């Protein structure tokens, strides 16, 4: 889930007094840190700890703006700032406005990510045939949700034998695919459908580091947590 960052970002994240600033692109209108009053994102990868989840995130945002249309698309960004130095802006989620209230130019917004589009009955596109691979099913669902699949996803050669009878939501299908892969689905920072196996941490994630991400050494050797 890690993003590619500049050398400046890597320097700033390790320095004391570094702060995060957030900005929002709302229907292609940039709202910088000065526009924000407050915001939070309620997000969890696990509905219950385990596998087979397809989780959505909720953005609660208060900011000053001239106009925010119904159903506006909000792209959230973050950067690091320390004194006169500031990093690049990194994407931190794509959301769709569900509720909005305007009071004297201050907007109170509630927005959801695209996983909410999974709460619709899965009707495969014309020409889609079963049995199919789970990867093909995921691609069909993503197309219906009008999102991309994350390029980092890894699919096992499992198949779905037939289209289930009755009400079978896109989210139900995603959960079945996630469970088969021992993982969970969520929307990435770039707004793509991401499948993450529960045991997906790289081997280097077992090494001990300081709070700023620097390796802890003993006699010049990195310490491995078992």
Image (cartoon, helix red, strand yellow):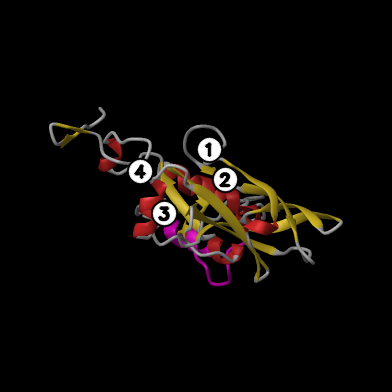
**Residue, far front:** 84
Q: Quadrant of residue 155?
A: bottom left
Q: Quadrant of the C terminus?
A: top left
Q: Circle 3 is placed at which residue position?
A: 159
Question: What segment carries the magenta color?
Answer: 122-140
Badge 1: few (under 14), some or many (20 or more) residues near its Cα, within 10 Å? some
First in sequence, mark 4 or 2: give its number: 2
CA gap between label 4 and label 2 equals: 17 Å
Q: Callout 2: 10 Å neighbours few (<14), some, many (20+)?
A: many
Find numbered disc 2 in the image and state the secondary structure of the residue it sits on.
loop
| Label number found at residue 46 | 1
If you read the primary sequence from the N terminus, does the residue marked by circle 4 or circle 1 appear first?
A: 1
Q: Residue 217 at what x, y percent from top left?
A: 20, 34
Answer with the quarter of the image where residue 31 lies: bottom right
Q: Residue 137, percent across and down?
A: 49, 59
Marks 2 and 3: in contact by CB < 8 Å? no
Task: For marks 1 and 3, give the one nearer the viewer.
Answer: 1
Residue tagged 4: 200
Q: Indicate left or right for 202 with 189 as reference.
A: left
Distance from the alpha carbon under mark 4 to that under mark 1 = 15 Å
Q: Earlier in the sequence, mark 1 or mark 3?
A: 1
Classify 112 as above or below 184: below
Along the line of sight, which residue is nearer the eye, 220 or 151?
220
Q: Which residue is mark 2?
A: 55
| x 33%, y 35%: residue | 210
Q: Residue 79: x and y, percent?
A: 50, 56
Tag 2 or tag 3, which sits nearer the N-term?
Answer: 2
Q: Is residue 109 magenta?
A: no
In this view, the mark in front (4 or 3): 4
Q: Residue furthest right?
A: 104
> Which dot marks residue 32?
none
Marks 1 and 3, how far apart in space? Answer: 24 Å
């Amino acid at each position: 889930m890690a993003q590619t960052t500049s050398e400046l970002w890597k320097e700033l994240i390790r320095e004391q007094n570094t702060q995060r600033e957030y900005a929002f692109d709302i229907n292609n209108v940039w709202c910088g840190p000065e526009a924000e009053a407050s915001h939070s994102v309620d997000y969890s990868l696990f509905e219950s700890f385990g596998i087979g989840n397809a989780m959505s995130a909720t953005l609660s945002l208060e900011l000053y703006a001239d106009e925010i249309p119904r159903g506006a698309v909000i792209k959230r960004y973050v950067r690091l700032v320390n004194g006169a130095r500031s990093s690049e802006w990194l994407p931190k989620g794509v959301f769709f406005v569900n509720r909005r209230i305007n009071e004297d130019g201050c907007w109170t917004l509630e927005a959801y990510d695209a996983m909410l589009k999974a709460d619709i009955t899965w009707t495969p596109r014309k020409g889609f045939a079963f049995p199919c691979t789970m990867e093909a099913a995921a691609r069909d669902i993503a197309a219906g949700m009008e999102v991309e699949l994350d390029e980092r996803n890894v699919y096992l050669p499992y198949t779905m034998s037939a289209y289930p009878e009755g009400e079978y939501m896109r989210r139900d299908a995603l959960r079945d695919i996630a469970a088969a892969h021992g993982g969970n689905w969520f929307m990435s920072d770039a707004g793509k459908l991401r499948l993450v196996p529960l045991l997906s941490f790289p081997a280097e994630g077992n090494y001990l580091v300081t709070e700023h991400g620097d390796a802890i050494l003993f006699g010049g050797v990195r310490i491995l947590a078992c």
